Amino acid sequence: MALFKGLRQKPKEDCLPVTERPSIKRQLGYYVANLQGIGARERQEDSFTVAGAFDVAAIREKGLLFAVCDGMGGMKDGKLASETAIQSLRQSFAEMNRDSDLAAQLKESVFLASSRVEAQIGGDGGSTAVIGILYQERLFYASVGDSYLYLLRDGRLLRLNTEHNLCHQKYLEAIRDGDLDPAPLREIPEAAALTQFLGMTGFHDVDGSVRPLPMQEGDVLLACSDGVGGVLHPQEIAKALQGGSVEQMCRTLEEGLVLHNKPNQDNYTAIVVKCVL
């Protein structure tokens, strides 16, 4: 019986070595939910929009837009003002050049929205606004008036924007004069009166990011009208944004408003965005 030893074959010269596939960096995705209610008012004058939330390809190509606009109560047709602003912001978002400065373009889109509201209502009405664009895992944002933009990161709640009201204006003036104690300014008459809003004649100031804010897994964003942010304490908001799905977060926020039971509860609108991998 002949025995054959196994022979090791040399690899052929034309065979390519096996290499590991390059790892593909996972990109952030977003869960989005909203809530809206009329409160104790006769009609709803808030408007909101989310563009691109349910299309992953669209988010990667153009980003995700979210915005809340709060029509001015006691002035002419707040609902028309907020709807006009939302329509203008959506159009500007669709037309933005993603290879150019998005922060500057967002700011310009707010000025354009204001001019369209003013043209529509003639300066006798207006709207606040808070807008965010999530593009390439970074946040660009802008705001006008007294709407709110919060970021919950690692259990800590941060307010990203500032209000355009008389109290804040007086505070800035006091800082320039060397007075760093803002407490007495909260008691001035009409401290909450808005100094800037979309549609006003002479509108000139937009708060917002100059550089984009990098986002990370677990971050939660809340954009809301003052019917939410002006009623719930930051501790209540932080607790709501740490529990369950984005839908549950919205329900908890609304339950908080019900518990406060304000007799003059304003319209309330909120958008919650959670960053996930």
Image: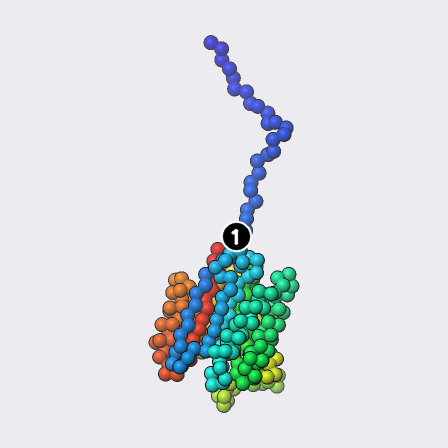
Q: Is residue 93 above or below residue 116?
A: above
Residue 56 drawn at (x, y percent)? 51, 56
Determine crowd level at label 1: few under 14, some 14-19, many 20+ residues with C-alpha closer than 10 A: few
- Residue drawn at (60%, 31%) of the image: 15
Q: Where residue 258 sits in the image (x, y, percent)?
A: 35, 76
Front position in the image: 220 or 98:
98
Hey, which residue is sitting farthest right in the picture? 100
Residue bearing mark 1 = 26
Quadrant in the picture for residue 178: bottom right
Q: Is residue 242 visible?
A: no
- Direction bottom: furthest residue: 189
Q: Is residue 134 visible?
A: yes
Quick one: which residue is furthest to the top in this view?
1
- Tell me which amino acid carries mark 1: Arg
Residue 88 location (% of width, % of height): 56, 72
The image quadrant that residue 137 belongs to is bottom right
